[in-house]
Image (cartoon, rainbow, N blue to C red):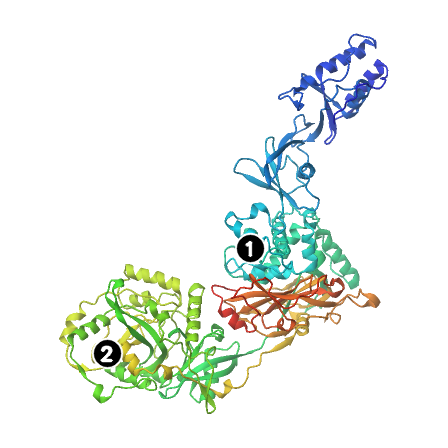
Amino acid sequence: MAATTAGAAEPPGLETQRREIEALLQSHDLRAGDSWYLLERRWHEQWKEYVETGDQNSSSFPGQIDNTELFEELESYRLKERLVENEDFVLIPAEAWHSLLAWYGVVPDQPALERKVVDLPSTVKVEVYPVEIFLCLHSDMDNVLTAQFSRVDSINVIQKTMRRQFEVPDSAETRLWMKSSETSCERLRNVQMSVLDSCLSSSMTVIMELRNADGTWPSSRPQIMRNAVEEQDSYKGQPGVCGLTNLGNTCFMNSALQCLSNTPPLTEYFLRSAYLDELNFTNPLGMKGEIAEAYADVIKQMWSGRHYSVVPRIFKTKVGHFASQFLGYQQHDSQELLSFLLDGLHEDLNRVKNKEYIELRDADGRPDQEVAEEAWRNHRRRNDSVIVDTFHGLFKSTLVCPECHKVSVTFDPFCYLSVPLPVSKERVMEVFFVSLDPAAKPVQHRLVVPKAGKVSDLSAALSQATNVPANQMVVADVFNHRFYKIYHADEYLSCILDRDDIFVYELSRGRAVEEEEDEVVLALYLRERSHYRDYGSGSSSYGTSLFGHPLLISTPRSQCSQETLYQLFLQRLARYVRPLDPSEEVEEEDEADDEEEELYKTQTNGVSDDEGEDDNEKPGPSKREGEGQGEESESEVNQSNDSTEQAEAAAAAAANSEGKTGCGTEDAPPPSGADGVDAHADARPAVDGAQAAGRQPSDEDEEEEEEEGEGGKEEATPPSPQSNERHPKRKCCHAKRRKQLFTIQAVNSNGTTERGMGEGGCAFSFSSQPYVAIDWDPDMKKKYYNENEAEKYMKHQSMEIPHTQTTVQLQQCIELFTTVETLEEENPWYCPTCKKHQLATKKLDLWSLPEVLIIHLKRFSYTKYSREKLDTIVDFPLRNLDFSGCLLKKTGMDGEPLSQYDLIAVSNHYGGLRDGHYTSYARNKDNGQWYYFDDSKVTCAREEQIMTNAAYLLFYQRQDKIRQPTLPTPQDRPSSPAQSANEVTSPPQDGVDRAASCVNMETD
């Protein structure tokens, strides 16, 4: 910038000089971007006087250009503050400056004061005072440089200046921060934005940050994680073979990210930082480039080869910020996340800054080729990004009016194919039939019922297998030794999940007869009294815990005395309860024991917290537990303690998640016909039962209500009001009585005691509470209750027939996608000829396919009557998926389309509608090896493991675009040098088993 010319060129005549300079000053207007120069006013006045004299030997000769008076000091040549135009300096255009410089020269070492014309919001002027900014590196904040920039300079100019000043390599990826105060820093994300628009002002600091070798940014490393990060610095693994930490039900996001991470064209685009030049910060449909940058950070970390696992917390936060449905930590659908992410990346990277309006035209008989090319051209005029280049294809949509037969043909872009699965109209269910015969063990049946059927259809199917009339059956869901729900006959089977333990009980008489004779169906629970009193509850009462299998027993309402019920229950339990010998039926006289029992009877202490730790407790027979032991044509199965742990794990899962949602109402008890009762519809059975008994809930009731609401199916300990008025009556009735195996208590649906019971021959009232518990003393239970016998059940011959799972070809799903369908009433088509909405027929065809084709298998089926997840196995090829038979466009050699695809990734969903877990398989682009990604765990996978009934999203890449691996395929070994003991070494083959370990997840 400094001109050090000591001797100027021979100047023209003085009059010529005057005319030239004046002409330049008059002809030059201020135009943004032009350069003007500051000239010290006194030197300029002396030059004017000199040229006006016309005498080159005049004493007014100005000499060399000297701006010394404009500088604060001559070492830094810093311009003085508050200089005023035409008082301290004049402004001349660049041509005039260069002319004067050529004629007169400038004082040695003095810089030229060049300034730019800037177009500010309200005016156009010469920027005399540029913005003076401090520059430094994030890694060396003490080394600060000072530089001046125009307000119209872009941030990219500052970035280039800093790269040059700090000798930053061209290969290093950088980002800038603006430090406006000691505690405030803000990202300068848009490097094309001007200094003025970025709100940069003098004395601010711009910090340059360089990305680490492991893909992270130094400023993003949490301080508390420094040690862990430094330990990983020495790790060097295969790029891309990296897990993603589950932040809390984010397996759906991890699965989608792993599939996209192993999509070669998209990942290579981000790894070479091509996205930086295409970030669109002005797109109103985009996220100001934030989603693209957050995704790039995750990809660069995963492909740095420096991490076992990456924590995508910032990405998760950005997604939740721009899509509120993904806020929090609920489970979601990986396909919905993928759809949002692809759309967000497209809009953030859209090369079209200003979208023009384009009016769409119908085909009107024009050739398909012409209409398709026009549609694709119009699409690219508004949408041009790496997402469109990689994932977008073209549909042909044909609508036919049923009235006038008008044919409308349009071509629409798509990002993925959502293909339906063939839906079976039947469903296989496994249930346990409990006969009225006390000596008969429960029998497990496998039944085929209508998928849209009702509970009555289930009873009818079971009736054919057992010869028991369907109207003498009650269907119930048993969970954790209690009835979770007792179903109405007209409820839909869609309320019952495949994993539910369904028991069907035979009643003594038909429902119609029971109603006429006023019979009641009692729900019978078995409880064990603890050895010790629960003094901590403040009631000095005994705790109880449920065990065994509940029963449904029909009895006339008039025969509900204690003695009658005792004999009835003893008869029904005869198979595994040994009756008292005559020698053991000793009359009880001990008043202390009597009072102790009375104290127990008046307590309302329900299931104790120790129930989950009771070693003697075992779950009921389940289609998910136990192996048969041969007994002629059927098998008896003893449940192991392992199954107890599984049941408790399931209870914990239900407690922490939405749990089971009943289809009935809680306040409807099963009357004579055992109509449906949802015991947990409101998750507060104890409180509701207390109110039904005619007492107001106390503070302890409210505490119990909180426990029930939080615990779901977990046991609760209700309060224990003292029935003081019953004590005198008890003492009056105190007399010798026979020893009994158990006592009878009225309870609520949760198995919790609600109130005291009738004595001796007094009858029970079941107007609102048809639940009864028989309470065992631990010693009596150990002596007279045969737990092994109680757990045995038999398998019907229908269980011996192997249940073969339906398998369909992927090609069948694609053909189903392209079949003709009639529009639904909610979505009619407006016919331009008929001038009204019509239920037209619609047919979709594939016109052109993208480089990477995503196929979404629609496993979640929603209708007006049912919701279900289809576990059908889809047979999809790993190589040579051929679309030539269904692709309309012919563009390849000899007219053949480029339609051969190979599989590169799969997103899996294990579980059902209400819960589940997402994982993924993916093929590494560098070594060609398949890997199984289960959140933070990564293992090698074999090709034969990939096709399962959990496959949900399929990623295919066109063969002509597949690059051969550059590295040799590794041997089967874990992805990390020291594989953890609990790491999965092979992917699960059974979706149910995999989902069972997941809690608190919901897929809708």
Disc 1 residue crowd, few under 14, some 14–19, many 20+, Cα 10 Å: some
* Amino acid type assigned to the residue bearing label 1 in the image: Val
Mark 2 touches mark 1? (CB < 8 Å): no
Residue 103 vertical position relative to residue 493 in the rendered view, above or below:
above
The residue carrying mark 2 is: 763
Q: Which mark is in front, 2 or 1?
A: 1
The residue carrying mark 1 is: 311
* Res. 650 mark: none
Looking at the image, which residue is at 67% across and 19% down?
Answer: 70
Q: Position of residue 803 (x, y in %)?
A: 55, 82
The image quarter containing residue 708 is bottom left
* Chain-order first, disc 2 or disc 1: 1
Judged from the image, the secondary structure of the residue bearing numbered disc 1 is loop
Q: Where is residue 629 in the image (x, y as percent from the top left)?
A: 45, 86
Task: Specify whether residue 285 is in view.
Answer: no
Looking at the image, which residue is at 46% across and 78% down?
Answer: 625
Task: Specify whether residue 604 is in view.
Answer: yes
Disc 2 residue crowd, few under 14, some 14–19, many 20+, Cα 10 Å: some
The image quarter containing residue 127 is top right
